[in-house]
Every structure is written in C-alpha cells, then in structure tokens.
Image (cartoon, rainbow, N blue to C red):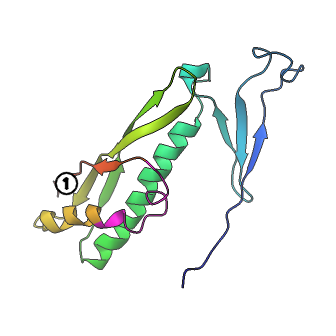
C-alpha cells in the first residue's frame, strides 16, 4: 500500500516596484522560494522572457531537481550493487519550446553524469543502473517529457 506525504513551500513575489501590476512593464518577475528552516532561493523569469539571468528560473529548478533525484537514486542503487561511486557530477541539458501563444513546455532532457569509480569497476553494471532509476525516481516519474542519459565513467 502506498503512503502519501506532503511538501510545503512559500513563494513570495518580490517584484512590486510600487505600482504592482498596473501595467505589464510595471513589475519585475522576481520572487523568493521560502521553505521552512532553509535559506531562501532568489528567482526570476527565464531570461528569454525578460528575467534576470543571474537568478534561478523555474526551468533551471525543474532540470536541477530531475538531475538531483536521478543522482540520489543512482548513488543508492550503486551502493546496493556493490559499486563504489567516488564522485558524481552532472551537466544536464533540456530542450523546451514556446508556441506562438506564449505557452511553453519541455520537450526532452538529457542527463550527462560524469561518475568516478575505482579502477576495475564493472562499468556495464554501473551503467545499467541508470535504466532502473526512472522506475523509482519521484521527479522522473512525475514529468511528462522523455528523459535520457549519457553517462561517462572515470576510473581512478
């Protein structure tokens, strides 16, 4: 039997320049994510839509969440399989589209982890773990676009 659990977050708009949303150009698309007990995360709209490129945007956060969830499950399943992961870094990429109406969506994402393992590790077994993650990863199971991976292994 499955068990439900909850998550909370507070999204606090910080973009009121004094006139609120009086006109489309009168406000900033900035906000903070405030999760209880954690430091705030300053965010902005996608730079393609006039956002601040120095701040995280929802698309950055979704891609980062997807890659982070994949990493955590990879580490867990590698440990279960007796594979010692010594380092893990990912530079995921996603492709999105914007329709003429302004509606947007992700089309696909590619995770590109570089995984450091001890010399002599069975890399085929290490690589097979990726195929199991989408059966269990909370975020990957929640998105409606294809997610693939292109892992690289460094033996030390």
In this view, which residue lies farthest toward the left? Answer: 120
Q: Is residue 112 left or right of residue 47?
A: left
Residue drawn at point x = 60 percent, y = 31 percent: 55
In this view, which residue lies farthest toward the right? Answer: 18
Question: Compared with residue 63, is residue 123 higher up or lower down, i.e. above or below?
Answer: below
Query: Which quadrant of the figure contains the C terminus?
Result: bottom left
Residue 143 covered by magenta stretch: yes
Reading the image, the residue beneath label 1 is 153
What is the secondary structure assignment of the residue under circle 1?
A: strand
Looking at the picture, how far across and down is residue 59, in whole percent?
Answer: 52, 38
Looking at the picture, how far across and down is residue 95, in whole percent?
Answer: 39, 34
Looking at the picture, how far across and down is residue 116, in whole percent?
Answer: 24, 57
Residue 32 covered by magenta stretch: no
Determine which quarter of the picture holds residue 137.
Answer: bottom left
The reply to whether residue 92 is in sight is no
Looking at the picture, how far across and down is residue 65, in whole percent?
Answer: 50, 51
- Look at the image and give the residue range highlighted in magenta: 132-144
Query: Within 10 angstroms of label 1, few (less than 14), some, or many (20 or more) residues?
Result: some
Residue nearest the viewer, comparing 110 with 79: 110
Q: How many marks?
A: 1
Question: Compared with residue 20, is residue 111 higher up or lower down, i.e. above or below?
Answer: below
Query: Which quadrant of the figure contains the N terminus?
Result: bottom right
Q: Is residue 17 left or right of residue 136?
A: right
Q: Main secondary structure of the magenta part?
A: loop
Determine which quarter of the picture holds residue 70.
Answer: bottom left
Residue drawn at point x = 59 percent, y = 79 percent: 3
The reply to whether residue 147 is in sight is yes
Residue nearest the viewer, comparing 56 with 5: 5
Residue nearest the viewer, comparing 123 with 20: 20
Q: Is residue 30 left or right of residue 50?
A: right
């Amino acid at each position: 039997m499955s068990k439900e659990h909850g998550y909370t977050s507070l999204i606090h708009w910080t973009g009121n320049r004094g006139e609120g949303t009086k006109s489309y150009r009168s406000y900033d698309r900035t906000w903070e994510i405030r999760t209880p007990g954690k430091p705030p995360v300053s965010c902005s709209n996608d730079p393609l839509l006039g956002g601040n490129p120095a701040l995280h945007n929802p698309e950055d956060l979704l891609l980062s969440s997807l890659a982070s969830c994949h990493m955590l499950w990879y580490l867990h399943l590698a440990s279960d399989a007796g594979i010692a992961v010594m380092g893990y870094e990912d530079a995921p990429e996603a492709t999105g589209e914007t329709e003429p109406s302004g509606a947007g969506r992700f089309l696909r994402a590619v995770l590109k982890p570089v995984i450091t393992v001890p010399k002599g590790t069975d890399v085929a077994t290490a690589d097979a773990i990726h195929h199991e993650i989408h059966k269990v990863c909370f975020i990957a199971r929640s998105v409606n676009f294809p997610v693939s991976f292109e892992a690289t292994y460094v033996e030390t």
